[in-house]
């Protein structure tokens, strides 16, 4: 990623008006070791009106996917999902072992204590999209069970 692109990202893409109807609490990203190419982002998301989380973006990863963990016979596996339902007023927990955000093709190591820009794209019932921009703290590797990639 070029410096120019980073500057564009910081300057223009996001309006300052965070959507009032979507609340994100306790977001965190799992720290990585130097050669590691993937990590997970976890948080609690609540929307006042029925909506769906349809996309996640971050400058530190080549791509970010929405995943869910599910039993496949006797084994827990994760798979990509297109979207995550946000029922009105319900806190949806994106956590290790359930739905989560997977960061893939990491461009660098994510170190404990830093803050990573993450943007959630939420679509409401009228198909209108809005972005929720977050500064997410990187925390130590506490969920080692999540190593499926
Ligand atoms: Cu995953």
Image (cartoon, grey):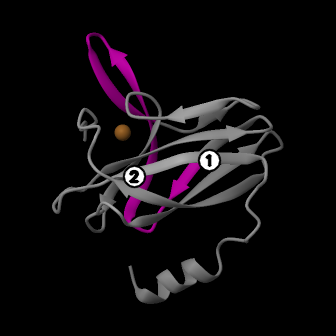
Name the one closer to the observer, 37 or 112: 112
Quadrant in the picture for residue 13: bottom right
Name the one closer to the observer, 114 or 92: 114
Q: Is residue 54 left or right of residue 2?
A: right
Identify the residue at horizontal 37%, vertical 66% (top origin).
Answer: 114
Ligand 1 is in which quadrant of the figure? top left
Q: Which residues are magenta?
A: 55-80
The 10 Å Cα crowd at callout 1, few under 14, some 14 to 19, many 20 or more, is some
Identify the residue at horizontal 60%, vertical 32% (top origin).
Answer: 92
Cβ–Cβ below 8 Å for labels 2 and 1?
Answer: no
Specify whether residue 71 is painted magenta: yes
Question: Whole-percent x and y of residue 134?
Answer: 57, 60
Label 2 near ligand 1 (CB < 8 Å): no
| Residue on which disc 2 sits | 29
| Residue on which disc 1 sits | 24
Q: Earlier in the sequence, mark 2 or mark 1?
A: 1
- Marker disc for residue 44: none
Q: Which secondary structure dominates the residues rendered in magenta?
A: strand
Specify whether residue 99 is painted magenta: no
Question: Whole-percent x and y of residue 122?
Answer: 67, 48
The quarter in which the C terminus is drawn is top left
Q: Secondary structure at mark 2?
A: strand
Identify the residue at horizontal 65%, vertical 57% (top origin).
Answer: 132
- What is the residue that sits farthest to the top in this orientation? 73
Question: Whole-percent x and y of residue 41?
Answer: 43, 48
In the rendered image, the vertical position of residue 39 relative to residue 46, given as above or below: below
Label 1 near ligand 1 (CB < 8 Å): no
């Amino acid at each position: 990623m070029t410096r120019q692109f980073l500057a564009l990202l910081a300057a223009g893409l996001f309006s300052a008006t965070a959507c009032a109807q979507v609340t994100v609490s306790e977001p965190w990203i799992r720290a990585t070791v130097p050669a590691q190419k993937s990590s997970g982002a976890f948080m609690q998301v609540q929307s006042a009106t029925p909506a769906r989380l349809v996309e996640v973006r971050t400058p530190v990863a080549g791509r970010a996917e929405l995943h869910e963990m599910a039993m496949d016979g006797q084994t827990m596996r994760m798979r990509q999902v297109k979207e995550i339902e946000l029922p009105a007023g319900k806190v949806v927990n994106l956590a290790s072992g359930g739905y989560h955000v997977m960061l893939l093709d990491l461009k660098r190591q994510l170190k404990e204590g830093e803050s990573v820009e993450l943007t959630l794209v939420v679509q409401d019932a009228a198909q209108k999209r809005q972005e929720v921009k977050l500064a997410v703290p990187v925390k130590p590797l506490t969920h080692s069970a999540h190593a499926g990639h």
